[in-house]
Structures are given as structure tokens and as C-alpha cells.
Image: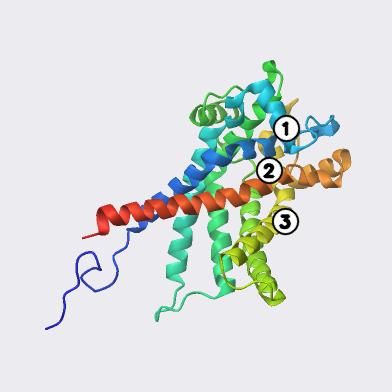
Amino acid sequence: MAATASPGAGGMDGKPRTSPKSVKFLFGGLAGMGATVFVQPLDLVKNRMQLSGEGAKTREYKTSFHALTSILKAEGLGGIYTGLSAGLLRQATYTTTRLGIYTVLFERLTGADGTPPGFLLKALIGMTAGATGAFVGTPAEVALIRMTADGRLPADQRRGYKNVFNALVRIAREEGVPTLWRGCIPTMARAVVVNAAQLASYSQSKQFLLDSGYFSDNILLHFCASMISGLVTTAASMPVDIVKTRIQNMRMIDGKPEYKNGLDVLAKVIRYEGFFSLWKGFTPYYARLGPHTVLTFIFLEQMNKAYKRLFLSG
């Protein structure tokens, strides 16, 4: 007599039971939000450094450490978590949308025999999902940039947003709804660059390290390849990121915006602040990338285990 599968082992068709797609997307967003709680100070330092010295002014911060200590001294411990609500909303919108689009496209492009898409197609799916997620997350990104930038301004020039929802309502009311998507093109471009750079640099770094003969395919190899990939990704995406930051934080001067477009930002930064100013905030950006990815996966694994134990076990 054929053995019957236990409820905990699988479904009626014998396949292992898994969580619904909606739960996977929810957990992805929550995991990103959990990681943001830990890395928010690095995001704030990165944004402050990218705005430091804007318009040929003297740089406020010499190094990342100087920026962090200055913020702590002037604004207190709570100051380094300014904009946390916007950072959480960015993860909730960007990460959830990106995961959803990626999953749908991946399944649509998987062959009838179960053959997954090839490397180039997977890269294209990743870039498409990243750009779409970035578009959806742009309003939260605008709020985040402005909230983290506020503390560096004189009291009479601060926007004084209370939280991300107050920021979104005020931006829409005072500057118009389209302002919520200001800088969406460089935001989407950054997502495409990050996805492309991560995919290409990780696989190349992994192969290079394996070929060196000093590594075998284990967790140390994956860690080292990830660190190299993070370095390449940071270097490639930072010029686009500073464009995004400057555009989203800019004010209207005599009815005209400070910058005409992204190319104008690049030209002015290079002209007045120097070529290497395009990589301002490199250290906190790089330092944020690794921990955020690691923490996201840790939280995701724990939530998946808890869901499996509570809802999928016999």
C-alpha cells in the first residue's frame, strides 16, 4: 500500500508546502525594514557628506568619523536616527515591489520544463525589478534625503518634517505632487547600476578567487566575493547617488531650481568641488551595503522559519 504524505511533509500533490507569495513579499519588506533600523546612522552620514561643501562652500565634514561625531555632538544620539521613518517606508515600498516584480517576471520567463532564465535574462529581470521598485519608492526617498539633511541647516531654514507621512503631505501640498517623484530618473538609474554591478562583480570576483587556488567554494569565498562586489558596486553607483541626493534636496531660488538636471549636478560638483567629490560618503555607503544585506537575510530566514513552524508544520 502506498504511503501517504504527512501534512507537514508536503501538500496534496506531494510537493513541499511553502508560504504564499504575498507572505514572501511581506517578509522581504519587513526584513529590509529590520536591517534599516541598524544601518540608518550610516545612511544619514552618507547623505550629510554628499551635501557637504555644496555650491563651493567649505566642507562641513572632513571624514565619515568626523561627520558622525559632529552629528552626535550637535544633535544627540537621537540625531543619528533622523529620518528613520522615511528609511522604513522606503524599504516597505522599494523592497516589496522589487521582490514582487522579480518573482513574477522570473516565473513568467521560466521554461515549461522548469528551466530557469539564463544569466543575462536574470540580470535584465533584476534591473527591471530594481528600477520599478525605485520608482515606487522615490517619494519615501525624497522624504529621507530631506529629513536627514535638515539638521545641517540653520534653524530658520529647516523644513522641520515631523515624520515621513508629514513630509509627504507637506511636499505634495507646498510643492505639488510631482515633487514627490523628483529625482526618480537618477534613483531608477542607481537601482539599475547597483543590480548590474552586483551581479557582474560578484560572479567575476568569485571566479577570480577560486582560480587563485587559495579559496574553495565555502562561506569564506562567498564573504570575500561579496566584499569585493560591494566595493565595485559602491564605486560604480556613487556618482549617480550624489546626483539623486542633490536633486531631491534642492530648493527653488528666485523661482528656479538649483540644478537643471542630473548632468548639471555632475558638472557643478566637478567644477566647484573637484572630480573625486562625486564619491563623497564612500565609506558609510560601503559600510552600509554589507551589513544591510546580511541583516536582511538573517531576518528573512528567521521569519520564514517561524512561519513554517507556526503554519506549515503538522
What secondary structure is marked by label 2? helix
Percent x, y for residue 58?
Answer: 85, 29
Q: Residues within 10 Å of mark 2 (few under 14, many from 20)?
A: many
Q: Residues within 10 Å of mark 1 (few under 14, many from 20)?
A: many
> Mark 3 and mark 2 in contact (Cβ < 8 Å)?
no
Percent x, y for residue 289?
Answer: 62, 50
Percent x, y for residue 255?
Answer: 72, 27
Task: Kindly indicate the quadrant of the structure image that contains residue 6.
Answer: bottom left
Give the residue drawn at x 29%, y 55%: 309
> Mark 1 and mark 2 in contact (Cβ < 8 Å)?
yes
Residue 301 shown left or right of residue 87 in the figure? left
Percent x, y for residue 135?
Answer: 56, 48
Q: CA distance from mark 1 to mark 3?
A: 23 Å
Q: CA distance from mark 2 to mark 3?
A: 15 Å
In this rendering, does residue 251 appear at all? no
The residue under label 1 is which amino acid type? Ala
User: N-terminal of the two: label 2 or label 1?
Assistant: 1
Circle 1 sits on which residue? 67
User: N-terminal of the two: label 2 or label 3?
Assistant: 3
Give the residue drawn at x 68%, y 16%: 156
What secondary structure is marked by label 3? helix
Using the image, determine if residue 82 lies above or below residue 88.
Answer: above
Q: Residues within 10 Å of mark 3 (few under 14, many from 20)?
A: some
Residue 236: which disc? 3
- Quadrant of the image for the C terminus? bottom left
Circle 2 sits on which residue? 284
The residue under label 3 is which amino acid type? Ala
What secondary structure is marked by label 1? helix
> Mark 3 and mark 1 in contact (Cβ < 8 Å)?
no
Give the residue drawn at x 70%, y 29%: 69
Residue 207: which disc? none
